[in-house]
Image (cartoon, coloured by chain):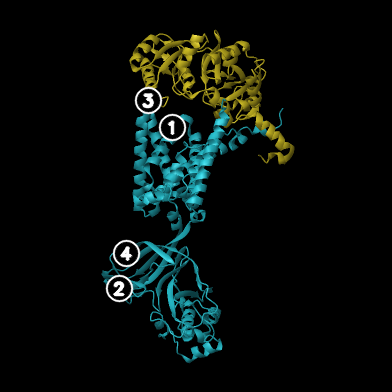
Amino acid sequence: MQISHSQKVGLTLAILIATSLGLMGWKVRNLGYSLKDVLPLTQYEVTYALDFDGHGDDVRVRSFLPSNDARQTVTEERDLSSGLHLTQVMDGANRVATWSGAEVPDRARIVHTFKVLPHRVAYTLPADLPVPDVYPPSAAPFLRPEKEIQVDAPEIAETLKRIRAGEGTVLERLTRIFDLTHGLQGRPFKGTTDALTALRLGEASCNGKSRLFVALARAGGIPARLVGGLIMERGSKRTSHQWVEAWVAGHWVPFCPTNGHFAELPERYLTLYYGDETLFRHTSDINFSYQFETRKALVPSPKAKASFTFFDVWGLFDRLKLPFSLLRTILMLPIGALVVVLFRNVVGMPTFGTFLPALLAAAAGSTGALWGVVAVAIAVGAVALARWGIQRLEILHSPTLAILLAAVVFTLLTTTLLAERFGVEPLTRVTLFPIAVLAICAERFYLSLTEHGGATAGKELLGTLFVMLACHVVMNSLALQVLVIGFPEVIFLVIAADIYLGRWVGMRLSEYRRFRALLFEAKP
Amino acid sequence: MSLLPFFGAAGRALLAQRERVIGINRRNVTLVYPNNPRHHYPYADDKLLAKRCFDAAGVPSPETLAICEGLFAVPGVVEGLRGKGQFVVKPANGSGGGGILVVGEWDEAEGAWRRAGGRRVTPDQLQRHLGDIIFGVHSNQLEDAAFVERRVVPHPLFSGLWADGLCDIRIITLRTHPVMSMIRVPTAESAGRANLHQGGLGIAVDLETGRTTRAVHHGRAVELHPESGAPLVGLQIPGWPDVLDVARRAAGAVPLGYLGIDVVLDLERGPLILEINARPGLEIQNINAAGLGPAIARAERG
């Protein structure tokens, strides 16, 4: 029996799709791959930026840095402070950092960054849990009064009695204390408010409410402590935050009376220290000011990494110490190329070659799409200018291209030099853009310019940039990246789509415009 | 499959028309790939190879005066042309008209050839031009061959449309059956190129009769030449059956099934094949105000 051409194509498509879906199904069923692990997590990058004037004297600044625990994973910590020495010691659960330096000049700066992968936590407190008579030695000290947590003040005892927080189960007592402190007026006050003041005023900021919570809990027989930290939000801010933890049946359970979180803590809370501490202590008289800068990024879930074991390219890259970004760039290229095919064959948008927009998008992955556009514009501008200069020399094709490459390199370096000189810091990064990709782009632009003229070359350039941005969006979809890394057989589906498009005879969108007179207008 | 039917009569009309008009995807998948195997592209891309096929099959094309297939041949060719005139130098693998040099009469007093616009070309310049072609300057490849053809003297009908150069008749053929045709006319605006996107004129020619039926300039139907005012519609191409016959025989001389064949009408020799194209453009549909689809279907029925 003779197999027709379209049967061949159909058979190939069926095999590709069946292989891909079959492998995926097998991995989910038999190897325990889980699609929900594919969803990315939010990672925060936090920077402490501390500014002060050293006046040429000795300076010491002491603060707290976050520790790893069940709720937060801290990685990629870097200290970028120059001229100051950083020492770290553990003080109980707290990581105390001290920056010290001699003859520190004015306008000095401490910059310390780290990345945090936080998790939301929520506890369900048993309704019938009684308050124990005796606590283990680790919890017992958290019943004692402190200078600003006046556990044994008569007003605290009266309040405890009034709200009946000294009787009943743990849940009942904590609920009543939480309701009282959460119900206090908020107050945009940055200084310290002790427990009694908060109670007397009936209003307080986060630290006043938290101290009152701790005082009442301790007075009510439940160990409690202050927690200091940061609510991570994109941008810069000058406010830290305080909340509390109560010891319940061996667990430190979080409460935030300021923002109304009962026995739970949202993801964006970053714990920096425990206890009634001050976040920053420093040599006096140095015009100290601080700022927290927070950026958000999506990262693959560690669970996905652990569950993907068959054809484990992710693990391979880990063992070879190759960056995750390289793996995702390689695996996303076929998908980027499919996006280009869609734009070329379905939309009818001209581009420089099939790979180039996808390659440009991959290259822009490290510098950002905007810098990809800037780098391409610089390269193409250099080519246009150089061609204008050398076309009257009538030299051969290959040497011409070599000269154009030199012009591109020279222009990029000059741009970076000028950018550095005039302090346009982001523009210095155009040199990071992979030169090989830019060189191909320059060559394609030159060929188009000489063969088809400026109008066509310009159209193709705009098309290339547009499709590059589209590729950038698709190729940077983290869920898609993790999907392809966990299920590389998705590439078979991409190939199937390519084959389908390769036999697709429909009219391109641009052709509806080109043949509009034939398609839309009445025939004479 | 499409939402268009829900837009009523206009949508249905669009769908019906869409079946007639051939887009790039459909041209490539249903016409170019099945009929023009890629390894046979040289028959269209290499003008010298095509000419050899035409000569072998007795298909008329402009007379070849000389061929330079290497730098060594250049001085001999230039010497042989000294004293002669009215020829054209072309790269075998050029594209878009690049590298084509049209040369007029030999001027013994100056020791140079005349060119259009009062310019001159000396034997040294000609030698250099041939060298450039051989080095691939005009064909984006490492080396190429140059050849010299006798200059076509166009029939008055065509020199009336464009005096400074050649207008050609483009005939689309499918397996030697003519499918659609047009005349491409350069203008001053298009800088002497017959490129329809750069201001050239396209004139539809009725396949049955050889009469021009409509003309298009910049996508708009016109009746008169936009520069000279000459009438463009209702012209009769002389010897039209011969033109079609030459096109059929040219299509039969090469192993390519779907072609754009460019024919010129020489005053003395009649229709000559200028070149053939294995991926002919689709703009001919706009010129003829008709999709290629029905004509292709007729040709496929034979």
Give the CA separation, mark 2 to mark 4.
Answer: 13 Å
The residue where tag 2 is placed is A60
Q: Is residue B40 among the parts visible in the rendering?
A: yes
- Pointer 3: what residue? B142
Residue under disc 3 on the same chain as residue under disc 1: no
**Amino acid marked by disc 4:** Ser
- Residue drawn where x is 40% and y is 75% of the image: A274
Q: Secondary structure at mark 2?
A: strand
* Residue of label 4: A81
Residue B79 vertical position relative to residue A35 in the rendered view, above or below: above
* Structural distance between the alpha carbons of marks 4 and 3: 57 Å
Residue A462, given in percent of the width and then of the height, sits at 50, 41
Q: Residues within 10 Å of mark 4 (few under 14, many from 20)?
A: some
Vertical comparison of A49 with A471: above or below: below
Which amino acid type is marked by label 3? Answer: Leu
Q: Amino acid at mark 1?
A: Leu
Q: Earlier in the sequence, mark 2 or mark 1?
A: 2
Q: Is residue A100 left or right of residue A43?
A: left
2 and 1 marks on the same chain = yes
In what element is the residue under mark 3? loop
Residue underneath mark 1: A447
Residue A414 is situated, as x and y percent measured from the top left of the image, at 34, 45
Q: Quadrant of the N terminus of chain B?
A: top right
**Seen in the image, is B3 located left or right of residue A463?**
right
The quadrant where residue A505 appears = top right
The alpha-carbon separation of the residues under discs 3 and 1 comes to 15 Å
**Chain for colour cyan:** A
